Amino acid sequence: MSAIIKVENLTRIFDVSKPWLNRMIERQPKALLTAVSEVSFDVERNSVYALVGESGSGKSTIGKIIVGLVAPSEGTVEVEGVDLASESDADKIDAVRADIQMIFQDPYASLNPRWRVRDIIAEPVAARGGKTAGLAERLLEQVGLSAADAGKYPHEFSGGQRQRICIARALSSEPKIIVCDEPTSALDVSVQSQVLNLMSDLREEFGLTYLFISHDLTVVHHMADMIGVLYLGRLVEEAPRDRLFSAPKHPYTQMLFDAAPRMDAFGREVEPPKGEIPDAINPPSGCAFHPRCPLAIPRCSQERPEMRKIGQTRVACHMAE
Amino acid sequence: MAETRVETRAGARPSRLRRAWQSDFTWSFRHSPVAVAAFGVVMILILGAVFAPLIAPHNPFNPATLNLMNGFTPPGQANEFTGELFLLGTDDQGRDVFSTILYGMRISLFVGVSAVLLAMLLGVMLGLMAGYVGGWTESIIMRVADVQLTFPAILVAMLIFGIAKGITPPEYRNEMAIWVLILAIGLSDWVQFARVVRGATLVEKNKEYVQAAKLIGRSPFAIMLRHILPNVLNPVLVIATISLALAIIAEATLSFLGVGAPPTKPSLGTLIRIGQEFMFSGEWWILLFPATTLLALALSINLMGDWLRDALNPRLR
Amino acid sequence: MTDTPVLSVRDLTVEIPTRHGVLRPVDDMSFDIHAGEIMGVVGESGAGKSMTGNAVIGLLDPPARIVSGEVLLSGTPVHKLKGDALRRLRGKRMGMIFQDPQTSLNPLLTVGDQLSETILEHLNVTQQEARKRAIAALEEVGIPAARQRIGSYPHEFSGGMRQRVVIALALCAEPDLVIADEPTTALDVSVQAQIIALLKRLCRDRGVAVMLVTHDMGVIAEAADRVAVMYAGRMAELGPVREVLTNARHPYTAGLMESTPLASQGRKRLRQIPGAMPRLGALPGGCAFSPRCDYAQDRCRQEPGPTLKRCDGRAACWFPLNTAAKEEAKA
């Protein structure tokens, strides 16, 4: 097994300050939002790596950095041994670009409403001057639509069908990696299962690697081999799926599991988790989770925990064992 | 009966023409009497202007056909000297008012349409760039636009007209007048296109289809032209229609003030200027008919623009 | 349950006339909600669940209108009320919680002012009393330091706190019925759990009847006492939550349950319901679910699906399933 994506010490800081004139008048310092903070992980070839987290956890930003839509502030991302941010060889960059594709959350915004489906699907190939004859039709059938749909416009399709078109577009340049950013969270349950099944089938057929970004634990449990849990831009725990679900080590992971609504928990009466996700502009000191953590000790508010390996699990917590 | 059978055999999808006829857009047009009436008036006027050489009974620009004896013939009455009949009367030089209106409209429409096209091209390009590139490019473009907006458009047009006139050699002035007019009105009108396109671009560029194009590695130029441009054209169309009415009026105003189309090639505005000299001496028709035509043209184009804005606004559907 | 239900919806039908024909987003819905009960209304987008809530509280956007059926609030019909009478009723006897806490609060007024305004309008109390009650309402929904926060503006609260304020606002005039339309959809998992717990507590402590509209089966399972499953404007199944979720009688409910990934099932392939919910303008003939239904027979394709009244009152299906029996047979 070898890593197809290597993420090392990745940090991304966004400047979200007001214009300098406002800052001068209101005497406010620059506001810097740390969306991703010192995150490291490897994605194995032909596996599904899932990033889970609530809003503000930085999971989408990591996805965008990996596909090259956002530049990292610090740290590196290597895809097939090529670092997109520092590589100077244009051919190599182009090759990696073709190897990595993305599926977005909103199937209504991710297809250009003025383009025919045929042109949308073939664009990744056409943009590189490749041959596109019959390509869209073939891919449409592969994702469960009909070849005759190629001449239609996106508005003629339902949300689930649009997401299939997005998948067909992602497949057209014959990528090795697909970053899936909440691919089913805008879909209804009955349609979600169709799309998830399709993605599983395609992965086997084409030997794809998925980086699966989601907030939905049930979906992640269904899809992932390896799961990384993010909190406030930091990777707090990483473990193989079964390991993570049977023995979560980080208190945040445990809280997340307890809070998720369960279909078999009729009238469950549990104490809901305390507090809310803190402001990412002024994150808590030390471990970002300590203000909400039931196990917190003074050390947690002073010292940021390092990633430690416990069995198959990597966890960033002083108390975990 | 036969028709239904043909349709079923052809498949569930009706023909392109039929679909266009049944689309929301044409439906809203068919059910808006104001839009239909305005469209009718505009079409009649445009056709009249385009086919002026075929329709007009006289060529007012050919001095050989003019007879000074025909001057000041009232509408619908035979001239007392020559016995010739003019539908809308004649002006002081014996030119048929009906013909001058048709020919004048050609100039007014030509100048108006060309000026709007120029403004649109400029405004859309600059707006796209400002919205998509952002940063300093955006600041510079939008500040220039803001400064220009602080002056009335007609003043800006007069300024440009004055400068252009100053730098063209006197012998070309009459020929160049029309082109200078187009340039002046076009340059004074790009701002609203730029503002609207920039706003729409800011919305579109954050949509995921643009990100998908970026990640394929398409150039910013290709993304702007092929992806964003088609999606910001709706409001541009609405503004273009309303701008057309404004441009025709601006041209008339300039011509009325004597800085626009020359008397040898009169536009509607020039005709109105000529006509108002005779207003108080009793020859009302020389002013009234060109003025009414201008009013009808501008008003119907504006009404169409209003309808278009409502029809293309998804929130009002 | 012999007492009069707080909300009784009888044969409610909502229609929207369009130029392509009349759409029926709510078709012949009947259900009751009793005091202290949470009734879940679940369905996918386009099922008509939000429209049902809006029809009950009189918030239908024209041209949508109630064409038949009635809405009884503690026995009195309210579906014919208009203008002032409706406005007084809303707020006083019915509260509403929307999906997006961002847009359901006035950004220019402090939360204290919004709360006292509502209290003053519906209850006969003095200004000071209203303020006291506003603080109490904020405390009740779990906003820390309510006395200090009462002068804050909505944007000074986080998303979860804002939804708590919305809940306080819906409850401050002590209504009998609260309609919560996707109250947790815009929130994170941990906050969602807090809001659900809050809703359950308020419902129990104050005996409010709650209509909980959501697309999330998990939320329904945890919060609701009874559930109504909607499909294409019609009631597909109605019953106690545990019954419906573990022993679905309508094939649509069964399909929904099986297509949701469950942690206990592991990696096995998900069951799919083929196709998608039909658009209202293009409902298939017969039972609206028949083209997607594995068990559809000729009768389903020819006759419209039965209403709940016409069958066992549980599943609106000609051939209801018995999931539990099937599972047993398998085992």
Image (spheres, grey):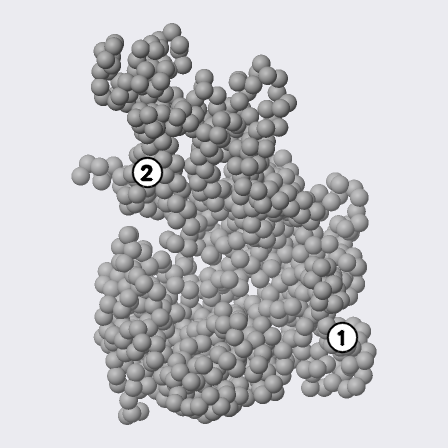
| In the foreground, B78 or A1 | B78
Of all residues shown, which one is farthest toward the front? B281
Which residue is under mark 2? Answer: B38
Rendered residue at 45%/20% (across/down):
B263
Q: Quadrant of the N terminus of chain A?
A: bottom right
| In the foreground, A117 or C319 | A117
Query: Label 2 is placed on what type of residue?
Result: Ala
- Which chain hosts label 2? B
Rendered residue at 53%/62% (across/down):
A184
- Which chain hosts label 1? A
Q: In this picture, is C49 found above or below C239?
A: above
Q: In this picture, is B288 found above or below C248?
A: above
Q: Is residue A206 left or right of residue B249?
A: right
The label number, if any, that marks residue B229 in the structure image: none
Rendered residue at 55%/25% (across/down):
B180
Residue B182 x/y as whole percent: 52, 28
Q: In this picture, is A309 found above or below B43?
A: below
Which residue is under mark 1? Answer: A316
Residue C284 x/y as whole percent: 30, 57
Q: Is residue C209 visible?
A: no
Q: Quadrant of the C terminus of chain A?
A: bottom right
Q: Is residue C83 left or right of residue A87?
A: left
| In the foreground, B83 or C79 | B83
Q: In this picture, is B203 found above or below B159?
A: below
| In the foreground, C293 or A219 | A219
- Badge 2 marks a residue whose secondary structure is helix
Image quadrant in which you'd find residue B289: top left
